[in-house]
Image (spheres, rainbow, N blue to C red):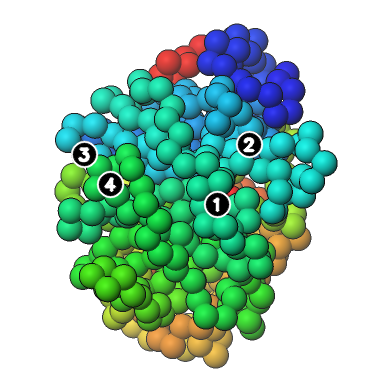
Amino acid sequence: MFKKYEKVFKTQYDDWYQGQSDYRKKVASDPRRLKFHLMPKTGWLNDPNGLCQFHGVYHIYYQYTPFEPMGELKMWGHYTTKDFVTYEDEGPVLFPDNDGDAHGVYSGSAFVKDDTIYYYYTGNIKYFDRDDYDYINQGRGSNTILVTSKDGSNFTPKEILMTTDDYPQDMSNHVRDPKIYQHGDDYYMVLGARDRESKGVVLIYRSKDLRNWEYYNRITTSESFGYMWECPDLFELDGKLILNSCPQGVEAQGIDYENVHQCTAMEMDYDFDKNTYEIKSIHLVDRGFDFYAPQTFEDEKGRRILIGWMGIPDADYVNPTVEDGWQHALTIPRQLHIRDGKLVQEPLEELKQLREDDGTVYDFGGEQGPVLTNDIYEAFISFKKCESFSMTLRYGVTLTYEDQVLTLNLGEFGCGRKTRKVQIKQLENLHIFGDTSSFEIFVNHGEEVFTTRVYSLEGRINIKGKCEGTMTVYPLKSFSMEGGCNEE
Ligand code: FRU
């Protein structure tokens, strides 16, 4: 086993991997393993990283700790796909093997230009041996590192572009997760940060050549909104400029911001000539228990696609999969749009290929609802009328609508996590993806989404109440995963 916070070289990983056949079998035999979500083969997964499409192939990298399920030392894992239903596990690609990233190849992104992929990530260094190490303001290094690739798998040597000393003086040591946005001929790099007063901000750097970066500005709210904004992502969509980020430690406000950390979408008005901005609105991106650090990219068809981490940091429950040696997954891919000024998410078209058949349509109304059993399914529920209802999504897991509030209740199967809610004035439809131990529930064509893990494994779906409509249910099949370079 690797020691905590020591460099890991590819050759060491390869040797370790050879001896882990039993570990992989143990993980694979867990009935909670998901059928159409990306997961770590062993150990821990968190943020999606480096998302891009290059020469037709989608590259999905992720924060990966293959050795154990608590996620101590991070590297980048790598999946590829052409169609989002057949994947290759390419094995880990960026290792913490350098003085600039020895304690973690942290999150970052990809930018495709002139037949080259530019990757920017944070090299994490913890100076435990220093007397003044306090985790926040002293004793941590956050290096912004560049590597490039012509194929997504082979990389140029790591180049440190910026170190902790290069960021503004009033920043704490927490500066990370670079992502690139192009506007005109200029490139802008956004970095998540915590200032020395523990206010969350996003730093912006500007470059003409993707290599030399100059400090440009910072985005923050006038009143403090969380102490650290992780994983910023600035992008244009349907004529609007959106800043997604993950403010940590925002206080709950009624049924909003109930998770320990959040993911928000801010609509921005940015005047790049004057370098001034206004944050026009802030919305929660997801309403469930397990959604964090999403990343977006534009694919070759011009679609803005989002994939998130189906988990959150500092969660106050123990995920039962830990005893089987693994933890967490990525969300299904979603296409983004702006509708009525709001970011909306819809499951990617390609997921239709997972349907086992053309779907069964059930009319429902009143007290008698259909009861069906499929372990993994997609359901589209279209309401003609909807005043209130109670729906079973799976044994012991319910979704209810009452007084214009939609409530997801995990009952006994959330490992202590019970309910999450959202106000919906008029419920028109629900689009539900149920995998063995997860749900993604898209409300009113993705105006709101609940993403959550849940540990009731028995399929069952039923709707009854003061409502009428049709429900179309599709049993789903697994996506396929090839072992890639790590095949047994
Ligand atoms: C978000 C995050 C990032 C960091 C990475 C480390 O979940 O904390 O800010 O780069 O995870 O794994």
**Residue that carries the numbered disc 1 in the rendered image:** 175
Q: Earlier in the sequence, mark 1 or mark 3?
A: 3
Badge nearest the viewer, 3 or 2: 2
Q: Position of residue 64 (x, y in %)?
A: 56, 34
Query: In the structure shown, which secondary structural element does the residue marked by tag 2 occupy?
Result: strand
Between 295 and 100, the one nearer to me in the picture: 100
Which badge, 4 or 2, comes first in the chain's sequence? 2
- Label 1 crowd bin: few (<14), some (14–19), many (20+), radius 10 Å: many
Residues at marks 4 and 1, CA–CA distance in whole angstroms? 36 Å
Instruction: Tell me which label, 1 or 2, sits earlier in the chain.
Output: 2
- Marks 4 and 2, how far apart in space? 39 Å
The residue that mark 3 highlights is 113
Q: Amino acid at mark 2?
A: Ile
Q: Which mark is residue 125?
A: 2
Q: In the image, residue 224 lies at what x, y percent?
A: 59, 76
Q: Is residue 168 above or below residue 343?
A: above
Dots 3 and 4: beta carbons under 8 Å? no
**Going by the image, does 396 lie left or right of 487?**
right
Q: Residue furthest right?
A: 131
Rate crowding at label 3 as few (under 14), some (14 to 19) or many (20 or more) other CA atoms within 10 Å. Answer: few
Residue at position x 43%, y 15% in the image: 485
Amino acid type indicated by mark 4: Glu
What residue is rendered at 44% in x and 65% in y?
218
Q: Is residue 442 left or right of residue 197?
A: left
The residue under label 4 is 350
Q: Residue at x 34, y 82 (%)?
A: 384
Contact flag, marks 1 and 3 (Cβ < 8 Å): no
Tag of residue 30: none
Q: Quick one: label 3 or label 4, which is nearer the N terminus? A: 3
